[in-house]
Image (cartoon, helix red, strand yellow):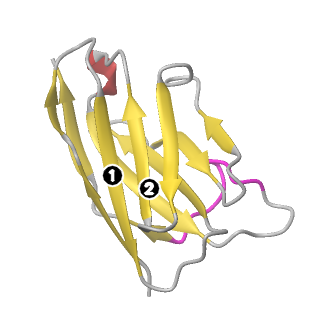
Amino acid sequence: HVQLVESGGGSAQAGGSLRLSCSVTGSTRSTYCMGWFRQTPGKGREGVATIIGSGIKFYADLVRGRSTIARDNTENTLYLKIDSLQAEDSAMYYCAARPAVYGVGCLPTSDFDYWGQGTQVTVS
């Protein structure tokens, strides 16, 4: 069973930076596709960024150029750093994981099997 626990959320000032962490435990593989998503009340879940074991990354337009997704397979931790924070970045952030599937890109639009409980980010 895979468990994901996010941390690092909180209040931040617009223009500042924030780094989120996601601790992964259970039967995961370094080849897993992992990603960050966010959701605000009344709005659907948005894919933020994904990364697969080979290191290939995807960023959604809403954070491209001002965010970095990274994974430390030794520490079983996934990270997301967002710079130049905007009020629109305020949301509950979730990390997610799924096994790599041949022919299925590691993109936010793919189906993820495991989800964390989320960490709230508020930018003012």
Q: Name the residue at 55% across, 19% down.
A: 65
- Left or right of 100? Residue 28 is left
Mark 2 surroundings within 10 Å by alpha-carbon count, few (fewer than 14), some (14 through 19), many (20 or more)? many
The residue at which mark 1 appears reads as 21
Task: Work out which residue is located at the far front of the displayed protein and give it.
Answer: 74
Would you place residue 109 above or below residue 48 in this image? below
Disc count in the image? 2
Viewer-proximal residue among 1 and 78:
78
Residue 40 seen from this side: no
Contact (Cβ within 8 Å) of mark 2 with mark 1:
yes
For the N terminus, the image quarter is bottom left
Provide the secondary structure element on which disc 2 rests: strand
Helix, strand or loop: magenta stretch: loop
Q: Name the residue at 28% across, 11% down.
A: 15
Q: Name the residue at 31% across, 16% down.
A: 86
Residue 66 seen from this side: yes
Q: Position of residue 107 (x, y in %)?
A: 67, 48
Q: Position of residue 13 (x, y in %)?
A: 17, 17
- Left or right of 42? Residue 101 is right
Q: Position of residue 11 (x, y in %)?
A: 13, 31
Magenta-tinted stretch: 105-113
The residue at which mark 2 appears reads as 78
Corner quadrant of residue 29 = bottom right
Provide the secondary structure element on which disc 1 rests: strand
Q: Amino acid at mark 2?
A: Leu
**Disc with the residue nearer the chain's start (2 vs 1):** 1
Q: Amino acid at mark 1?
A: Ser
